[in-house]
Amino acid sequence: MTAEHCPVCNSPLFQVGGQLRCPRCNKPVVIVKEGEEEKTAVTFTTLGDLEETLLARINECNLELREEKNPSRAIEVGTQLNMWLSALERVRRIQRNIG
């Protein structure tokens, strides 16, 4: 356990494998210059929120594609689905890189 605290939940941070981690949020925490702590907290929260939004959009596309009879519209929905999946992959890559 370190003297530092999580900028999101204020739990004590632990040093694990060379990085600081919050056991409550189960996220890595990066210490930045004074005055930027709030920015760090927003980054972790924003990525999680974005992942949830993308998963919801992917589900919506899946449901629409399942019922779509018009081939042109199915292609449009498939294109949207591809876009959401690519975005989700990028978000998860970012989360792995900071985690």
Image: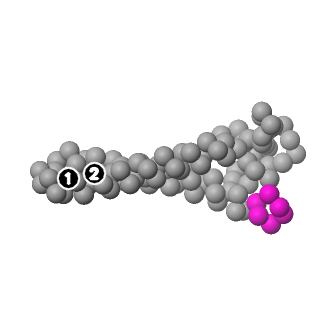
Separation of disc 2 and disc 1 at Cα? 6 Å
Q: Main secondary structure of the magenta part?
A: loop
Q: Residue furthest top?
A: 17
Q: Are marks 2 and 1 in contact (CB under 8 Å)?
A: yes
Nearest the viewer among 51 and 89 is 89
Q: Which residue is mark 1?
A: 74
Residue occupying the point 64% across, 57% down: 43
Asked whether, in this view, residue 51 is left or right of residue 73, the answer is right
The image position of residue 3, as x and y in percent, is: 88, 45
Read off the residue under disc 2.
78
65 lies left or right of 56: left
Q: Is disc 1 placed on a helix, strand or loop?
A: helix
- At 48% across and 46% down in the image, what residue appears? 89
Q: Quadrant of residue 21?
A: top right
Q: Which residues are magenta?
A: 32-37
Residue 27 in view, yes or no:
no
Secondary element under disc 2, as helix, strand or loop, is helix
Determine crowd level at label 2: few under 14, some 14-19, many 20+ residues with C-alpha closer than 10 A.
some
The extreme left residue here reads: 69
